[in-house]
Amino acid sequence: MADPTRRDYSLIGLDSRLAVERGLATAEWYKCPVDRKTMKELMKRSDGPAIRDTLLWFAFLAASGFGGWWFWGTWWAVPFFIVYGVLYGSASDSRWHECGHGTAFKTRWMNDVVYHIACFMILREPTVWRWSHTRHHTDTIIVGRDPEIGVQRPPNIFGILIQLFAIKSTWATFKKLCIHATGRLTAEEKTFIPESEQHKVYGVARIYLAIFAAVAVWCFAIGSILPAMFIGLPTFYGCFMGVFFGLTQHAGLDEDVLDHRLNSRTVYMNPVFRFLYLNMNYHVEHHMFPMVPYHALPRLHEVIKADCPKPYSSCWDAYKEIIPALLRQRREPGWYVKRPLPGHVEPLGAPPPGLVAAE
Amino acid sequence: MTSTIAVTWVDACAADEIDEEDVIRFDHAGRTFAIFRSPDDAYFATDGLCTHEKVHLADGLVMDNIIECPKHNGRFDYRTGAAKGAPVCVDLKTYPVRIEKGRVLIGLD
């Protein structure tokens, strides 16, 4: 029998129906006031920053990959592969994300090319994730609607820890690749991928599986895992920084509220982290105004910060809150961190009955 | 045999109210529209809400002849209403526009 205290995070269950009945699906969200002229400036597209950051990304991948290959068989290869892995398995997270929004580059095909490369690196099927992320932006952390709620309540701490090496996500993706390669979708995927787009999923799944099979054959043929250290395995061994960044986005915060200031975090990060993460540390800003390119998010932050909760001063500052919050939610799944809003505004929507805010 | 649809011309705004390569929202009789001014100073009108999830396009970004929805970055050619790819799959309805004495009129059926 289902546990009545647990919420149903599936997209086809009770909470999905309740979200629609309560007006939380495809709802109107709070937006900080920004005048049109300023917003037009902030939304303006440019190829320059993303070309620079993409060239740097590929250059660092090539240099660290060369080091790993050169020192292969010695311990000196380890630091090179750690760097290569983080660039491949973590930096790809923000690249697929920004290019999926179509905001990283001004030129459309550049967004598409980098999107597909980054999707493969982080093992996210491009069509599936484009549509799942669309839903994530429509119904951010609305239970039963958002397919990308990273930490469900009560949190599965063991699951989070093994995800540092992409074990949960990769296992789930491989199962889905096998389903998609046979020309099928899961029932949940059918709720957010339009019929006209579904055929794209099947073709890409077959290509992904063919690439992994080719790498496996190559490894067997030469009796070494070296090819897989460059293609495939970095998704596992380089994923940890992506998880480290990603947890700061929403973990421990409120669910079912129509205000990104209450369910998302903006965290100040150092320039290296911001390069890897492409400024997604400005997460409240990104969710509220997804049309603003990553390179303009710091400027947007300056424009709206007076209307937002105080940002976290560092990753440490964020994790001081996240870790105790997740541990407490293990015992009290209804508990959440309540972000203090500036006094002059009230959030839209209301928390579900039974949820308790942090004091 | 040809059929004609009666069009009612409605005064929407002053022509100079819209910046070049920009859009404004126009609400009329319980409906909402988006009125565009292209970089070459031509005017166009479409339904005001994105066909994907009913978001006001007037908050979006106009680039050349494309309007991008502010919520999910769905793109339309505002001259024809054509959807230009995921996540928008359904075209926008367009309306005729004419300029008279510095005013933008849109033809509603």
Image (cartoon, coloured by chain):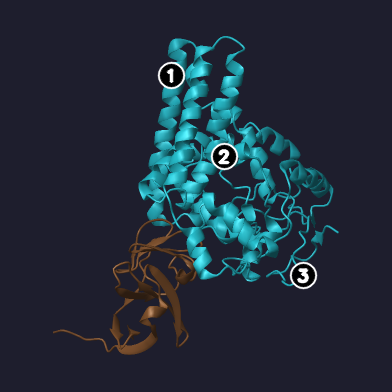
Q: Secondary structure at mark 3?
A: loop
Q: Name the disc covering residue A217, or none.
A: 1
**In this structure image, what is the colour of chain B?**
brown
Q: Secondary structure at mark 1?
A: helix
Chain at numbered mark 1 = A
Q: Quadrant of the C terminus of chain A?
A: bottom right
Circle 3 residue: A343
Regarding mark 2 in the picture, which secondary structure is present there?
helix
Is residue A336 visible in the rendered image? The answer is yes
The quadrant in which residue A275 appears is top right
Taking the spot 58% from the left edge, 68% from the top edge, the residue there is A34
- On the image, the x and y values in percent for residue A125 come to 47, 42
Q: Are marks 3 and 2 on the same chain?
A: yes
Q: Is any atom of residue B72 visible in this view?
A: no
Which amino acid lies under the numbered mark 3 shown in the image of this protein? Gly
Can you give x and y, in whole percent of width and height, for residue A25 in the image? 59, 65
Residue B11 image position (x, y, % from top left):
37, 88
Q: Residues within 10 Å of mark 1 (few under 14, many from 20)?
A: few
Asked if residue A334 lies left or right of residue B7, the reply is right
